[in-house]
Image (cartoon, rainbow, N blue to C red):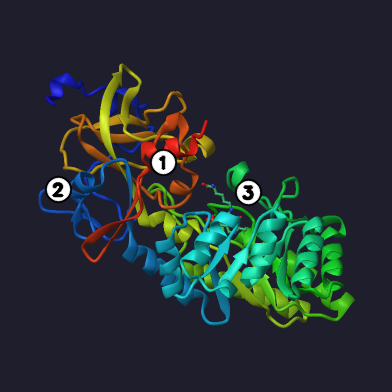
Amino acid sequence: MSRSAHPAGPRYADVLPEGHYSGPPTDLNTLDPKVWARTVGRNTDGVATVGGLEVTRLAEEFGTPAYILDEDDFRARCRAWAEAFGADADVFYAGKAFLSRAVVRWLHEEGLNLDVCSGGELATALDAGMPADRIAFHGNNKSPEEIERAIRAGVGRIVLDSFQEIVRVAHTARELGVRQRVQIRVTVGVEAHTHEFIATAHEDQKFGIPLAGGQAAEAVRRALALDSLELIGIHSHIGSQIFDTSGFEVAAHRVIGLLRQIRDEHGVELPEIDLGGGLGIAYTPADDPREPHHIAKALHEIVTRECESAGLRTPRISVEPGRAIVGPTAFTLYEVGTIKPLDGLRTYVSVDGGMSDNIRTALYDAEYSVALVSRTSDAEPMLSRVVGKHCESGDIVVRDAFLPADLAPGDLIAVPATGAYCRSMASNYNHALRPPVVAVADGAARVIVRRETEEDLLRLDVG
Ligand code: LLP
């Protein structure tokens, strides 16, 4: 396509208030390692590569849109978390971020545990051979069938989320002749500085049992009185995409306050404390996440200090990172379809996917970055909005980004940091076919979740 057929749209200098920005992006070609998976780079022709494979080849072989996942990066992040927390702590990968059989096998091989929150996730974990005692089962409304399946499978812990569930799990465990290990999830009243829909420890919400008003202490009382339950600890998850450990500090302080109350009232020191997941990642180069060893050090210090001052033995800590492990390891590869410059506003760049493969921008106002990956370009930066092909004006993948002004249909662009909560929240809206997940390792690519087909859609439509 010639450039004149696709006018460049407003120029950077025309649309940005003077003095407001330090200047246009000087280089649109560099793939910032802050947001791209570890093995991503460009070859001498300017084509982006991952694990040594050119994205143009991946697009030819697997089609677009596609999630491209760097397996080496995933495994390295698993090891970094496991090593940072050490032998006296447990890392549970939160499967809701993204789960598939291959992911379960990688977790198993790298020595991580797994947090599942539905029968489907449990089935995937068991099918791929995760030992049941390394699985934690979560959820605020587990069905009786899910509870039974989890107990029969022998899951290592069930995280109890309500008074009804204490009774349901105790009843099913008794029927099956099992003493089920459980934790109680409490809400500690912390307002995590994140989007309202992904903050989970303030009191006015559906998860957990509030510490406030003595409800959590009452839940502990009931659980301790039931023979078929072995209460191993207290669980707290304060939210997602959090950069700062101060929320965890308050949560640990309050959870340990409950542990002290339990010790004083029941003479029991619960051996475990789970601080949940929620550690943030870089979606754009402006984000500054902390490394696992910093987080581990901070959490260990907080828990040790709080326990010392409460006169308690330090419990075993567990954490449940999802996004921080898988998020940075993948990018979504799209082909540019149409380009519409709107005078004085911005240029709309439509790709062959959209809100069906990444709902996070529409749902949480999430920010992403984007780059031209099938070639480099020295053209001027063009203020762009990357949108999908759905029948909805909120179908935005990247709200504000700069792409080179010579962008043309057929170019490949990619959105980094889409490993978490993109494929796992993908939908068939407008009967879109959910993209495949292609794992790249050792210079080879393989499909770990295949692309949906029209036959898949029609198979469910039995009318
Ligand atoms: N543990 C529990 C009990 C959780 O509820 C969650 C996330 C995690 C661990 C993992 O959190 P992570 O480390 O991945 O932030 N769809 C939203 C995120 C919802 C998270 C729900 N629970 C998003 O796309 O941002």
Mark 1 packing: few (<14 Cα in 10 Å), some, or many (20+)?
few
Residue furthest toward the top? 343
Is 311 placed above or below 28 here?
below
At 60% across and 56% down in the image, what residue appears?
119
At 20% across and 36% down in the image, what residue appears?
411
Measure how far apart labels 1 and 2 are at the Cα level.
Answer: 37 Å
The image's mark for residue 46 is 2
Residue furthest toward the front? 463
Judge by depth and name the residue closer to the eye, 215 or 352.
352
Is 222 placed above or below 398 here?
below
Front of the two marks 1 and 2: 1
At 58% across and 69% down in the image, what residue appears?
135
Residue furthest toward the right? 265
Amino acid marked by disc 2: Gly
Position of residue 110 in the picture relative to residue 442 (left or right): right
Label 1 sits on a secondary structure element that is: helix
Measure how far apart labels 2 and 3 are at the Cα level.
Answer: 41 Å
Please tell me which of labels 1 and 2 falls first in the chain.
2
Label 2 sits on a secondary structure element that is: loop
Task: Return the residue at label 1.
Answer: 456
Is 9 placed above or below 37 here?
above
Measure how far apart labels 3 and 1 are at the Cα level.
Answer: 35 Å
Amino acid marked by disc 1: Asp
